[in-house]
Image: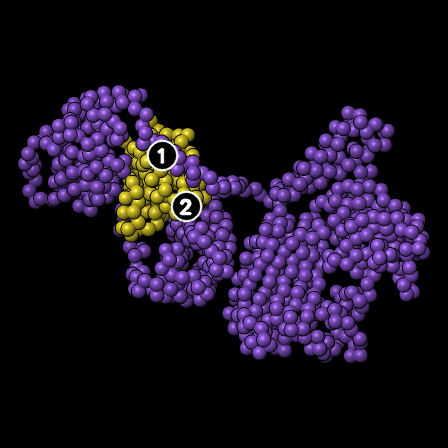
Amino acid sequence: MDVMDTIRQTFFQECSEQLTEMESGLLVMSEGEADSDTINAVFRAVHSIKGGAGAFKLEALVQFAHKFETALDHIRSGKLAAGGDVMKVLLRAADILSDLVDASRDDVAIEPDTWQASADELLALTASADGAEDEDDFGSIDFQPALIDFGDTPSDGIAIEPLTSTFNIGFRPKPELYGNANETILVLRELSRMGTTQIACDTSDIPSLDDIDPAGAYISWTIALDTTENADAVASVFEFVDTDADISIEQPSSFSLPDLPEPFKFSASTDAPVEVAEVIESVEAPSAVVEAAPVIREEATAPVVPFPAAAPPQQTAAKTDAKPAALATIRVEFDRVDRLINLVGELVINQAMLSQRVAESNISNSSPIAVGLEELEQLTREIQEGVMGISAQPVKPLFQRMGRIVREVSDATGKEVRFKTEGDATEVDKTVVERLADPLTHMIRNAVDHGLETPEARVAAGKPAEGVVRLTAAHRSGRIVIEVSDDGAGINRAKVRESAIKKGLIPADVQLTDSEIDNLLFLPGFSTANSISNISGRGVGMDVVKRSIQALGGRISITSRPGKGSTFSLSLPLTLAVLDGMVVCVNGQTLVLPLTAIVETLKPKEQDVHCLGADGRVMAIRSTFVPLIDVGVKLGFRRTTLNPSAGVAILIETENGSRSALLVDSIQDQRQVVIKSLETNYGNVSGIAAATILGDGRVALILDVDSLVKASDVDQLAPELRYGTGG
Amino acid sequence: MTKTVLTIDDSRTMRDMLRMALTDAGFNVLQAEDGVHGMEVLSGSNPDVIVTDINMPRMDGFGVIEAVRKEQRYRNIPVLVLTTESDQAKKLRAKAAGATGWIVKPFEPEKLVAAIRRVSA
């Protein structure tokens, strides 16, 4: 691949990082909590995008980023307050910038009107901040850094005799010139490259040795330059030094050498220029003693004087070091990580098998083999955690994209929305993050479009005009739980029911609980909106959301309170890879229970178990009753329930915090298992989350405790199970 | 002798471009990701020229210039500032801080090389 193409790729990768950085900074700013570091980071992000875009000649991107950057610079310098309206403009600009980056990356032609409105808004901001600043400063880059050839330009073909002209140049450096590490000799060398020079040095201002300031500049120069270059090119040689020297450039019509007061020709044999430069260099140290001859002085002073000036800067450098270093990162193709994850999975299984073989061969626990094996197990676990960590990603970028959806929908609907996120740092496998984008987008749209009321309606209901949409993520029971909630009117259950009856989804006379009605939203072909708005009506219903969440091994549930709002809750596996589990035995079958769901295990006594209804049983645990579920019966391993006293009860807690006891025959072991998806290889089985391969090579099913418990709770039955309309 | 250039820029894109342009021109290239990192790299090396960005986290380009000019053993190293700003004020500020010269982004490789040649012996 061409080097430029590679760098271009890097640029767009970097852009997406910068955009994330920018967005999170802007969100902090709109919360009114931004410090100067945050604002600087946002500024830098936009600035970097502009810089890179310039290198690839992405004109629209450069221009827009420049306007954006100017506005941010005004905030940074305090000229512009980052109030609510300003932040809205900035957030819109952030969206446009992100669009422009995408379009540039994909080489899509960019219509100016896609960004002009936002650019005008930004311009208005900056204009309001400082009256009428000339926005045209950009693009008028007059800088031409010395494109110098060597005076022999006219080459092949028609020989146009170059017009040679002579410049008389006076050059008197000030001390600052040397202080900034510029060198007269380099300037003279540049001039010499342009043509033929005659250089004279005026040393008449050099004071007596006693009066010399080591950092002073006492020598001036006169240069006669014969060149084919124009005056601008000649002037550009002095660009870096023009404020640090008195410079005069004359282009006399006559070609005579100027009459110099004390001229002498510049040549290597004279002791003037080279050594003078050295003198200046060596005497710049304030501590340098000024008695010896210049050239010797450098050697003489160095060992004696400890350069006191050098100490303080070192200290300041150490101070700035105290800030935490940015984490260094490398980029790795996802395929490689994927391969590593699979290999580690095999390693875990292999290690488990080895442990089992050793256990079977009656080796004492204190034998070196057993001890070594234990260490191996520990290492394996650490490797596994490390590898899982590689592919884990925070949900932050995903959440930030949702911020944009909220803004778009609120603009389109005229609703005022405050978007809040929590748990941005929660990590989940990259594949899970990617596949969450679409369902989340739809849920967020719904929350704003259907969930929140109009500002007027909110005020009438005694709520603040501004609605709140909250997006949270958290780890719970070894899964990630993502919630989208709004503080809107809640689900209008009467309307939902009526609509479902009208559409023939449910019989008109059916009795439904509140949660059953809420779950009707997930039925295919259901839509409460009377007219399909252009926001939510994109042909994707909640049924599609539900299916895509299920495809990820996840579940979705709704809670809603009239007048208070609704919460959609997603529960997803963190990764499709490993699980800490308790291995149990049920009717000769080996099953695995996720350890994270288990509260405790106990041996039930017969008097603690009570019958409830036809075939329900509850168990008394420390003065509370929890449902007792016979796993063997539930999964169809046996028909008659097990005598509780013959088995073991495992108290588990589901995601919504409710507890149940699962009755199994016996507990075998507690170990880590590698999850092998059942959905991919076989199909979705209710009550079963996945499968694993045990140490002895047998397949064991991993229980999905939530769905196991839910399926026994009649009220919680999913509508499609009840009405047979599910797909 | 091969000249060594230390480039300090927080943008990976810009670092890559600088590396490409300078390596092609036969320079030995050292790179740092921000001012603090730049000073660390500087302390373990002896570059002929430093090229630094202005806007960077932790320590910006002005900070780099200041730190370089303060220290006896670095103070004669030319420092070129990379800037997208073409306005005189930015340049003057860099100049006042002790910058030797500047390069306006986006740069043509030959202009970058010419600017480096103009400040390095």
x 52%, y 73%: residue: A414
Whether residue A155 is situated above or below residue A549 in the rendered picture? above
Residue type for callout 2: Met
At 53% from the left and 62% from the top, the residue drawn is: A404
Please indicate whether residue A135 sits to the left or right of residue A402 in the image: left
**Helix, strand, or loop for circle 1?**
helix
Q: Judge if badges 2 and 1 mark residues of a common chain.
A: no
Chain coloured purple in the rendered structure: A
Name the element at disc 2: loop
Quarter occupied by residue A523: bottom right
**Residue with the mark numbered 2:** B56
Q: Going 25% across and 40% down the picture, which residue do you hit?
A: A148
| Image spot of residue A198 (x, y percent) | 13, 33
Which of the labelled discs sits on residue A312, or is there none?
Answer: 1
Q: Nearer the viewer, residue A209 or A156?
A: A209
Crowd band around label 1 with a 10 angstrom C-alpha radius: few (<14), some (14–19), many (20+): few
Q: Amino acid at mark 1?
A: Pro
Q: Identify the chain of the residue marked 1, using the numbered disc in the image.
A: A
Residue A369 spot, x, y in % from top left? 78, 26
Q: Is residue A119 left or right of residue A298?
A: right
Q: Colour of chain B?
A: yellow
Q: CA distance from mark 2 to mark 1?
A: 23 Å
Q: How many marks overall?
A: 2
Residue A66: horizontal and vertical position, in percent? 38, 56
